[in-house]
Every structure is written in structure tokens, then in C-alpha cells.
Amino acid sequence: MEIIGSGQGVQSYKLISPLDIYERHILQEYIPRTPRASALSWMKALKGRWSKRTTPRHVYSFYEKGNWLKAAAKIASVTPSGAKFIITLDASSHESLNGTNNVSYPTVDNLVVFQDGITQGYVEAVDRSTPGAHAVTVQKTDASMDIASIATVGSTMVFYSNVKPEASKKGEGRVPRFEKVTNKIHTIRQDFPVTDWEMQNRLEFPVENGSQYLFYEGLMETGDRFEIDIETACLIGPNSDGLTNAEGEDLQTMYGAIPQIRDEGNTFKYFNRPDYSDFQQLNLGFKASFGDKKYLMGYGQQIRQAASTWLLEFSKAGTGNIDFTAIDRENGSTKAVEIGLEAIYVDGYSYFFQEWDVFSHPTFLGADGMPFNDMGVLIPLGVTKNYDVDGTMYATGQKSTEPYCQMIYSPPQFAAKHVRGDHAIWQTGAMADDGATNDVVEKWVHMQGYYGWEMRCRNKFGLWEKAA
């Protein structure tokens, strides 16, 4: 395509189709964009750790394995019963199954060790008739054991082992702890209208890799907004219930990562700025949740700056733990001190830092007064075993493992040429590329997708927030 430039003679440009322009590889490879807070940048940091899968429904469900190893319990009450003791478990020592707080760890023929680590007993019976207040009948393993004074309210006991007679019979089985997690596919849509006059004026001519491209400025801005909407919906979308619009139509929102972590994961606080003790608290919290040893931390700008400041001040003590010697770049051409926190290894746990533009951009979630600039989202790096909806592992046709997090999308049901992977673009108006749809001299470019966000083993995820 040739365009006559003012005083420059004939200029050659490549014209990108308004539909093809939203192909992500074109956007990312050729077109410079501002702000650079889109293109699902935070998900790219998880490359190889997350995936996408499709679902034909707007509402989808999956099953999440519960915590099988919760053998420690708190004592709510102790009632002597002759030489035995009836001990009621605290409500916090139960887990929910099918909406009721009715699952606890102990079974008949367990041994139990009390808080002093010496006093032990034998579980003769388990009474589960009261949800959230299961009771165990315990007898001493030895007459010298002083259960009465050791098994106090609020203290901890741990169940273990399995004491069976030689001619044993089947005892109580453990209830499989699978939680049904239901999320919703969120409809995300953006539109870009142009008239015949605007088409002549709202153009940009970027130069990239020696080639010049002609495209609509407004379309690019709409594409940016569309991707930011997907990004923020996956991160902070609420778990709505019974939401309708002014016309009474049902509205659906996806259950984003941060609300899921608040409800089912770990929330940590740091004061002023993160230091060594704060990282230790992360370790302890994830250890209690049987978390991974390696985490990616997506964060707002302030966390990295605060943690780097802590390390700089720590180095002043002259401990030799941090090396700030001059860096010889490219065979000694330049000397510099490089200060950039990319990862930290603390007592067996690794945290890999990744600044998320969507949290840090001053015109969006990183705006003044918003909490995201001071927030970190901790995502375990690894995979978990996959369970089908009936609780069966390794379902036919499925992978044996799943990433901890992945995007779920419902493919648009449009003509094949309008499908761009997980979203659709089409045009309406008298100037539509595929032909007029009405007699109004305009062109509307529509972008739409259906997205959800899935997190498995949510107890292994974490939020790191600055204390007020």
C-alpha cells in the first residue's frame, strides 16, 4: 500500500486487517503499545506452570482434594468416664464436606499423643453425631499416664498409628475429602466504533523492525482494554451470587485468584517493609498447609523496593552475606553495582520475584491509595494430581497432573474466521469488512470472550499484604 506523504514522496506501508490485528503474536511482536499492563503479562510469568482448557458451559465445576494429613486437633472439652475420658474436638479441628463441618481425622484403633509428647492413649470409640464437635473415647495406654491433668482445654493432641488385634476386623474407613469447587465463566466484551470520517483521522504509523504498519489507534486501545479486563477479572473478580442487571438478567462473574486465596488460602501481613522474620512467617504458613518449596511472587512495585532496601541495610552490618562487588559486564567493558531482587532463598524455601505491571501501573490498580502496589500474590510452582468429578484419579483421557492454576474458557460459537483461539472478533455496520449489516455508515469492531479462573490446592497459595 502506498500513501503520499507530505514532502516525502511515496511511502510504503503494510495494511493489517482489522480482524488480524488482534492476533496476539502481531500485537506482541510488531506493535508498540502503552500502557504495557496488558497482554496477560502476569500469566506469562507462569509459563510452563499454567495452562488453558475449554468448557462448553458458562458454569463449570471441579473437585479439589482435601487435607488428608490434618491429624493434629485441639481439645474443646474433657469429660471423665470411669477410667476413660470423652474428649470433644474443637470446631477448628474439623473440615467441611458437602457444606457441613463434619469431617475429622481420628478413627477407632488410633493412638493419640497429648501435648507433653509423653502422655498417650488409645481411641476406643469415635462419636460423630454432632457436626463440628466430634468426640473420642480415650483410654490410657498405661495406668501411669496422667491424661486428666495433661489433656486440658485448648491443648493439642495428635492421632497416629492403628492398633489392631491379631484376629482383626474391618474398622472405620476415612471419608474421602473432596470439595466441589464451582466457578463461573465471565463474559468480557469491548467494542470499537468508527465512522467514515474518523477512519481517515484516527490512524497511526508505527515503525517496527524496519517495516511500517497502518492500523486504527482506537482499535489498539480497545484491544489493550480487553486484555486488561481479562487480567483483572482473573485476579480480583468477586464470587457473586444472585447478581442481576437493571433488566433482571442474570450476571456471572468469575471467581478470581485473590478472592479465592482470601477464602481458602493463606493471608500474611508485613509491617513497614518485608524482612527476614516476615519471610520466616511465609515459610511457617506454607509448611502448615503442606505447600511447595518454590513460589513465584507476583507483586506491586512497593514490595520489591521495600525488600531491596531491607537487604541494602542488612549489608551495612558487614556480615559478608551479600556481595556488592563491582560487576564486570561483557568482559569488563563497564563496571556497575547491580541492585535487583529477583529471588530469595530462606530456610529451604525459594521465592522468585516478578513485578506485575497491572499492580504497579499508576493509572490502574497501582493508583494512589489502592492496596495492590503493596501486595504480593504467592503461587506454588509445580503441579498437582488431577481428580475427575467423581473423585477418581487419572480419569480416562485426562492428564495425571494439572497445574496449580489455569484459565478456563468457553470457545465462542461464531464463524470459524472470527475465532481467535479463546476469543472472537466480528464487525457490524455498513462499512464492515465482510459486508454491510445495516445502512449506517460506520464500522463497529466487537471483541468478546468467555473466561474463568481455576486454582487447585488453594490452601497452598498466599497473599502478602502490608499491615495498616
Image: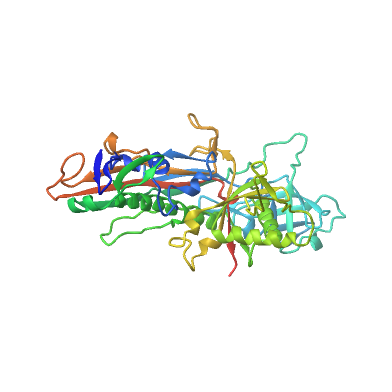
- 277 vs 454, left or right, is right
- The residue shown at (60%, 57%) is 304
Query: Does residue 422 sit above or below 319 in this rendering?
Result: above
- The residue shown at (54%, 32%) is 394
Q: Is residue 268 visible?
A: no
The foreground one among 154 and 352 is 352
The foreground one among 363 and 123 is 363
Of all residues shown, which one is farthest toward the left? 439
The foreground one among 286 and 92 is 286
Query: Does residue 102 sit above or below 409 in this rendering?
Result: below
Query: Residue 298 in the image: x percent, y percent?
Result: 55, 52
Location of residue 245 (image quadrant): bottom left
Query: Residue 41 in the image: x percent, y percent?
Result: 47, 48
Query: Residue 272 in the image: x percent, y percent?
Result: 63, 67
Q: Quadrant of the C terminus?
A: bottom right
Location of residue 267 (image quadrant): bottom right
- The residue shown at (42%, 41%) is 29
Of all residues shown, which one is farthest toward the front? 7
The foreground one among 68 and 419 is 419
Query: Residue 405 in the image: x percent, y percent?
Result: 51, 45
- 236 vs 223, left or right, is right
- 274 vs 187, left or right, is right
Q: Quadrant of the N terminus?
A: top left
What is the count of numbered marks? 0
- 174 vs 369, left or right, is right
